[in-house]
Every structure is written in structure tokens, then in C-alpha cells.
Image (cartoon, helix red, strand yellow):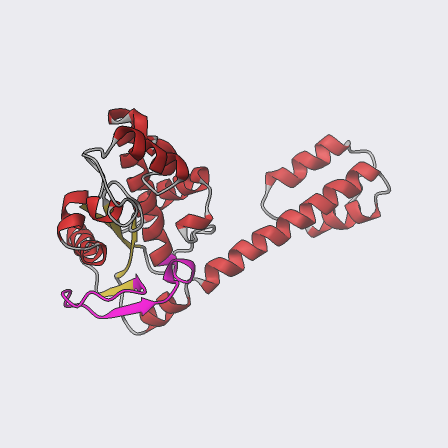
Amino acid sequence: MQIHNITISEIQALLRKQKKAPNELLAAMKKDSRIGVQRLLEKYDREQKSLQKLRDKAEQMLINERRLWDQGYLYLAGLDEAGRGPLAGPVVSACVILPKGLVIEGVDDSKKLTASKREDLFDQISKKAIAIGVGIIDHCRIDNVNILYATKEAMIQAVNACKQQPDYLLLDAIHLKDMPLPQLSIIGGDAKSQSIAAASIIAKVTRDRMMEGFARLYPEYGFDKHKGYGTAEHIEAIRKFGISPIHRKSFLIKIFSNVQR
């Protein structure tokens, strides 16, 4: 393949046309002495290495799922939550059942992803999932029981909300003794299982959107920025304005010795 009579812009367009460039084009680029062509080739190589890392990560995150699929389980549900640590707002759990063999590159622990990447993956997961269920436990219930119990309640809600009931649960370092289903609890599961990571993303985006809604109701607290977590800005707002209707009093007692209503 001859490319000496092709402009650098045209070569760049050729590279963009497909995920993997033809070997003939890459070989011709290596022989091309133009600095611009060599820079394009270096950039392409970097991008391919980055994509391969994503593919390898995606395959690694399906190890448990593939083993369970091989055992005959079809509807594997990943379960995870968002909002166990904040001083305000609900805890939100999600249950996600993805099709057998589906690989969604880029899925990872939601905390490791940017907000825009989470939104993009939220849309992908929502379109491709067999079923998604969400469970929400508010601040009052969290205060009445405790955050771990409330999280488990939200997870049970999420499972029951799925239009297709799962035949196996994958969870992040937690066990639901009240659910009569086989379960696998994986420490750090949101970074090791695609199903759990997908649930992590659904739960996180759902809760973040809720907190942005609360920010419009109670703008003085900045819920859209910190999502209820105990940042210095948030704590200062509590000192200045007192407790909002969505604050977890049981959490605030641990921080403030004297909380004003």
C-alpha cells in the first residue's frame, strides 16, 4: 500500500474509520518518513494499548459470571449500593441482570469513573440489561435501624423490583440471608465483577440525580456538589443553617456534639 501521495489529514481519517486499522496501512505508515505520520502512528499505538487494557479488564471482570453461566445459571444479578457514607439523603441499591456473554467495555467501580463516563455507561447498561431494579431507603429509616440493615433492605427491594427474577446473586462483600437465592459475596466486587459494577453505576447515577433534586429544594447545603458526603463545605453549611429535612441525625451525632434542629 502506497501512502506517500496521501495527506496526513487523509491518513488520520483512514485511522478513524475503523476500530483497528488494516495491517497494510500500518506497515506503510512505519515506512513513511513524515514526522506527522509517525506521530499519528504513535498516537494510534497508544490508543490501541489503552483499548486492549479495557478489553482485558472487561474479560477479567467476567470470570465469576462465566463460571456460573457454565454451571447452568442464566439470570445472574449484580447487586450494589450508593450512599452508605453520606450525612444526608437515601441509600440506593440497584440490581442488574445482563445478558449471558455480554461484554460492556469500561464498566468498573462507579467511584473510579468520571461523572460523564458513569452517565454514558448508565445509558448503555439501561439499554442492554435484561432487567434492572432499584431500591431506595430514606434517611428516616436509616436513623431508625442502621445503615447496614437499611442497605440490605434496599437491595431486597431492588431484587424484587426486577421484571425478571434472578437465579443467582453477586454482591460486594455482603450477604442477604433473607433472600432465598444462591449468592456469591466478593470482596471489592464492584471492581471484580461486571454485574456488580453495573449495579454500582446504576445506583450511583440514580442517587446523584436524587441529590441534585434535593439541591434545588435546599440550595444552601450544596447537595449537587458533595451529594451529601461530609465535606468541609457541607459541615460548615450544617453549622450555619442547621439540619435539613433529609439529614441523617444518627450520622450527625457522631460529628456534632450538639446539633440544632
Residue at image position (29%, 35%) is 211
The correct choice, above or below, for 104 with respect to 120 in the image is below
Drawn side of residue 74 relative to residue 117, left or right: left
Q: Position of residue 31 (x, y in %)?
A: 84, 47
Instruction: Tell me, yes or no, if residue 138 can be seen here.
Output: no
Name the residue at the right extreme: 33
Query: What residue span does the magenta drawing correspond to?
Result: 171-195
Asked if the magenta segment contains residue 180, the reply would be: yes
Quarter of the image with the N terminus is: top right
Task: Answer with left or right where residue 261 lies relative to residue 200.
Answer: left
**Residue 96, position in %: x, y?**
28, 53
Answer above or below: position of 52 versus 18.
below
- Which quarter of the figure is the C terminus placed in? top left
Residue sitting at the far bottom: 71
- Counting labels gives 0
Examine the structure image and report whether residue 47 is included in the region drawn in magenta: no
Please tell me in which quadrant of the rendered image residue 140 appears.
top left
Locate residue 259 relative to residue 237 in the image: left or right: left
Name the spot of residue 151 as percent of width and height, x first.
22, 54
Give the residue drawn at x 31%, y 45%. 86
| Residue 184 in which image quadrant | bottom left
Residue 176 is at least partly visible in this image: yes
Q: Which is more toward the observer, 92 or 103?
A: 92
Place residue 190 in its image quadrant.
Answer: bottom left
Q: Position of residue 235 (x, y in %)?
A: 34, 38
In the figure, is residue 161 to the left or right of 110?
left
Q: Residue at x 26, y 45 (%)?
A: 257
Question: Residue at 22% of width from left, 70% of height from top?
Answer: 182
Instruction: Please identify the residue farthest to the front as the structure is shown.
Output: 258
